[in-house]
Amino acid sequence: MPEAAHPNARWSLDFLAYSFGTFGKLRILAVIDNCSRENLCLIADTSISGARVAREQDAPVRIYGKPGCNISDNGTEFTNRGILR
């Protein structure tokens, strides 16, 4: 994949997970601008659905503008109906 030529050309979305042992798990959605390497958004919760991923992207779009494209892995949060709409 070629490098992003300018800010907002491409954003990456990915999940980080942290386990508190028997107390539960924390999931963090990270949105990164591939050109500037700036962290645009971090959302932490115990569960984040595909519909919420789509909703949470509205805030960085209002601040930074719409990206040329988004890239992500093929996790269930990024391939369900909520995000594909």
Image (spheres, rainbow, N blue to C red):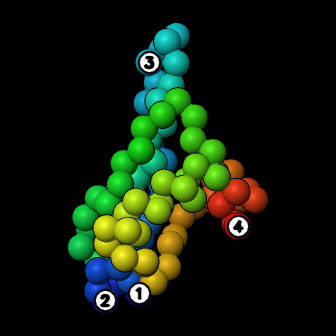
- Which secondary structure, mark 1? loop
Instruction: Find out whether the residues at labels 3 and 2 contact each other: C-beta distance under 8 Å.
Output: no
Q: Position of residue 83 (x, y in %)?
A: 65, 61
Q: Position of residue 75 (x, y in %)?
A: 64, 53
Instruction: Write down the residue under mark 1.
Output: 2
- Which is more foreground, mark 2 or mark 1? 2
Q: Which mark identifies residue 28?
A: none
User: What's the CA distance linking mark 3 and mark 4?
Assistant: 33 Å
74 or 55, nearer to the observer: 55
User: Is 60 situated above or below 64?
Assistant: above
Tell me, yes or no, if residue 48 can be seen here: yes
Q: Which mark identifies residue 20?
A: 3
Upstream in sequence: badge 1 or badge 4: 1
Crowding near the residue tagged with mark 2, few <14, some 14–19, many ≥20 C-alpha atoms within 10 Å: few
User: Residue 72 vs residue 6: left or right?
Assistant: right
The structure residue drawn at horizontal position 57% and vertical position 41%, both measured from the top left corner, is: 48
75 or 70, nearer to the observer: 70
